[in-house]
Image (spheres, rainbow, N blue to C red):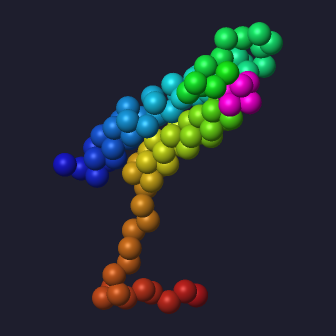
Amino acid sequence: MEPKTKGIIATIAAVVLCGCPGLFMCFFGSTSILASQIPGADIDVMGSSDPASAMTMGVVFLCLSFIFVLIPIAVGFFMLRKKPEIISSSETIPPTS
C-alpha cells in the first residue's frame, strides 16, 4: 500500500473517531453555555441546578472539542505532506561555485 493511501485512511479514521465527536461536544458545550445565561432555565448538571456548573461544563466541553477537532487536522497534515528526500552519505555532493 502506498504511503499516500495510508495517509488518506488515517485521516478519514481520525475524522470519524475524533472530528465528529469533537463537533458534537462543541454543540453540546455551546448549548450548555447558552442555557446557563438564560434566567429561569431548567438546568440539571449531574444533580446540580447551579448555572455556574452549566457554564463550567460548557467551557470544558468547548476546550475538549477544540482539541478533538485539531487532531484530524494534524493527522492529515503530517500524513499527507511531502516529506523531504534524505541524501545518503555515500553519494558525493558536487562543490558549489
Rendered position, 82 above or below 12: below
- SS majority, magenta: helix
Residue 87, x across and y down, in percent: 38, 78
Query: Residue lying farthest left?
Result: 1
Compared across the picture, whether 25 is left or right of 91 comes to right
Q: Residue at x 56, y 40 (%)?
A: 64
Q: Nearer the viewer, residue 93 or 66?
A: 66
The mark tally for this picture is 0
Rendered position, 11 above or below 46: below
Query: Residue lying farthest front?
Result: 47
Residue 51 forms part of the magenta stretch: yes
Q: Nearer the viewer, residue 15 or 66?
A: 66
Q: Quadrant of the C terminus?
A: bottom right
Q: Residue at x 48, y 45 (%)?
A: 71
Q: Quadrant of residue 48?
A: top right
Residue 2, x across and y down, in percent: 24, 50
Rendered position, 92 above or below 64: below
Q: Quadrant of residue 44?
A: top right
Q: Is residue 38 visible?
A: yes
Q: Nearer the viewer, residue 70 or 93?
A: 70
Compared across the picture, whether 81 is left or right of 50 comes to left
Give the magenta range: 50-55
Q: Nearer the viewer, residue 5 or 97?
A: 5
Compared across the picture, whether 82 is left or right of 62 comes to left
Residue 73, x across and y down, in percent: 50, 43
Q: Residue at x 70, y 17 (%)?
A: 35
Residue 94 forms part of the magenta stretch: no
